[in-house]
Image (spheres, rainbow, N blue to C red):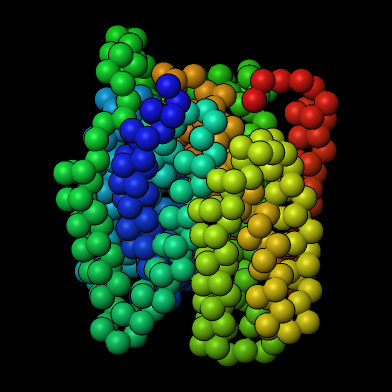
């Protein structure tokens, strides 16, 4: 029966990959430009902090809401609504004539950033438990390709076609993605589960979020991968905001040179991510299981973060990016697969939405911690990230390897 389901669901996986991939190209185009545009409109340091965090703040509050709604009305309408909102936010970003509209556009983008959590729930619907990590690896591959292509497209279009160009291109791509998804994306949530969830008494969105969080806390098999997702994202986001500053400080590059050199390292990391999460993880997960891959990912990522901060030359970053990419490549899809496998069928959207909400909270706290600690010592953000993930290894070994549980 699983073989029939797998054959039947190849097409939905291709469609959902395409949907997330196109969306992330647009996302990757905009993210590196947010700070530059803020400075262009005269933002203060506090305003830049608001501009940089508003997306994740809104995503933190709204991702669980969209996830819960997708359990009741289906994945397809939420994905379509998310694409529509993202399209509007990109066009608003393009036509922003001041800081207020710029912040509003990023807030709107965060509100409708339901694509990833709903796409993960969609994959959980159409894959067997055995193939879950393979399916989640497609999301990682979409991330890798999107962030490989997005930043250079955004930077080149802004430099050669004007500041409005990246938003226009991203909005157009997202709009075309909306049309593609409307005609090709089928509903994945079975009618029986939708009807069961619709028959349940409606609760307020905030109460529903609280109930989902309480459900996760009470179940250690869910709590550990969810809290690990939060800590892993927090650790990695410590580095994201300071990497270009670290390169600039270490090698005394100009701003333009630091941005260019950072872009090449990120592009290389994206290529590695595509290889690992899009291909290698599909072979390793069935052989070793998600729990062992999580532990391996945490260990590799922890030591890679320390190694990454001690590159003797710029080109050394291309070498140290390899173990860092392997650590993330093992960790992220495996955690996503464990959460989806351990959540009941009727709560996939709400639980995965809560997980993505925790990721958003980590992306709020991580950059703040990273930028603050960078001012004390440029190496400190890397040490904080490494310590965070290596401590997790102890809990995974103690709870998952020494205590027999069903995976």
**Residue, x 67% and y 20% (percent of image)?**
406
Q: Is residue 135 above or below residue 235?
A: above
Residue, x 57% and y 24% (percent of image)? Answer: 342
Q: Horizontal placement of 219 versus 107: left or right? A: right
Depth order, front residue of 282/383: 282
Q: Is residue 98 above or below residue 198?
A: below
Q: Quadrant of the C terminus?
A: top right
**Front in this rendered view, residue 233 or 93:** 233
Q: How many marks?
A: 0
Asked whether, in this view, residue 407 is left or right of residue 67, the answer is right
Residue 191 percent coordinates (x, y): 27, 18
Left or right of 215, for residue 20: left
Relative to 249, is 119 on the left or the right?
left
Whether residue 50 appears in this view of the structure is no
Query: What is the quadrant of the N terminus in the image?
Result: top left
Q: Position of residue 156 (x, y in %)?
A: 36, 82
- Identify which residue is drawn at 49% across, 19% down: 344
Q: Position of residue 117 (x, y in %)?
A: 43, 39
Res. 310 visible in picture = yes
Closer-to-camera residue (117/278): 278
Rendered image quadrant of residue 257: bottom right
166 in relation to 384, above or below:
below
């Amino acid at each position: 029966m699983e073989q029939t389901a797998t054959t039947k669901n190849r097409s939905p996986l291709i469609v959902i990959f395409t949907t997330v991939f196109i969306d992330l190209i647009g996302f990757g185009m905009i993210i590196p430009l947010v700070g530059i545009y803020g400075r262009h409109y005269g933002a203060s340091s506090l305003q830049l902090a608001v501009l940089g965090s508003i997306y994740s703040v809104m995503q933190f509050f709204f991702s669980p809401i969209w996830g819960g709604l997708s359990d009741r009305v289906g994945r397809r309408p939420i994905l379509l609504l998310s694409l529509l909102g993202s399209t509007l936010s990109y066009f608003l970003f393009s036509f922003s004539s001041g800081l207020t509209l710029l912040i509003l556009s990023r807030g709107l983008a965060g509100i409708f950033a339901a694509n990833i959590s709903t796409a993960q729930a969609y994959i959980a619907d159409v894959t067997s438990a055995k193939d879950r990590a393979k399916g989640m690896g497609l999301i990682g591959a979409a991330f890798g390709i999107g962030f490989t292509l997005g930043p250079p497209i955004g930077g080149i279009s802004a430099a050669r076609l004007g500041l409005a160009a990246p938003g226009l291109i991203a909005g157009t791509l997202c709009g075309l993605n909306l049309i593609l998804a409307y005609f090709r994306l089928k509903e994945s949530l079975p009618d029986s589960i939708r009807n069961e969830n619709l028959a349940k008494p409606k609760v307020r969105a905030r109460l529903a979020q609280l109930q989902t969080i309480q459900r996760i806390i009470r179940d250690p098999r869910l709590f550990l991968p969810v809290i690990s997702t939060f800590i892993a994202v927090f650790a990695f986001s410590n580095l994201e905001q300071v990497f270009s500053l670290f390169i600039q400080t270490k090698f005394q590059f100009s701003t333009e040179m630091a941005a260019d050199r950072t872009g090449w390292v990120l592009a290389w990391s994206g290529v590695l991510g595509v290889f690992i999460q899009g291909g290698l993880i599909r072979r390793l997960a069935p052989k070793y299981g998600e729990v062992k891959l999580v532990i391996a990912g945490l260990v590799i990522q922890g030591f890679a973060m320390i190694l990454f901060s001690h590159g003797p030359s710029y080109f050394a970053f291309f070498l140290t990016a390899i173990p860092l990419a392997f650590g993330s490549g093992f960790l992220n899809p495996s955690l996503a697969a464990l959460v989806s496998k351990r959540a009941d069928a009727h709560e996939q959207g709400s639980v995965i939405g809560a997980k993505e909400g925790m990721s958003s909270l980590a992306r709020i706290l991580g950059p703040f911690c990273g930028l603050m600690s960078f001012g004390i010592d440029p190496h400190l953000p890397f040490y904080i990230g490494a310590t965070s993930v290596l401590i997790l290894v102890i809990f995974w070994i103690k709870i998952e390897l020494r205590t027999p549980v069903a995976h």
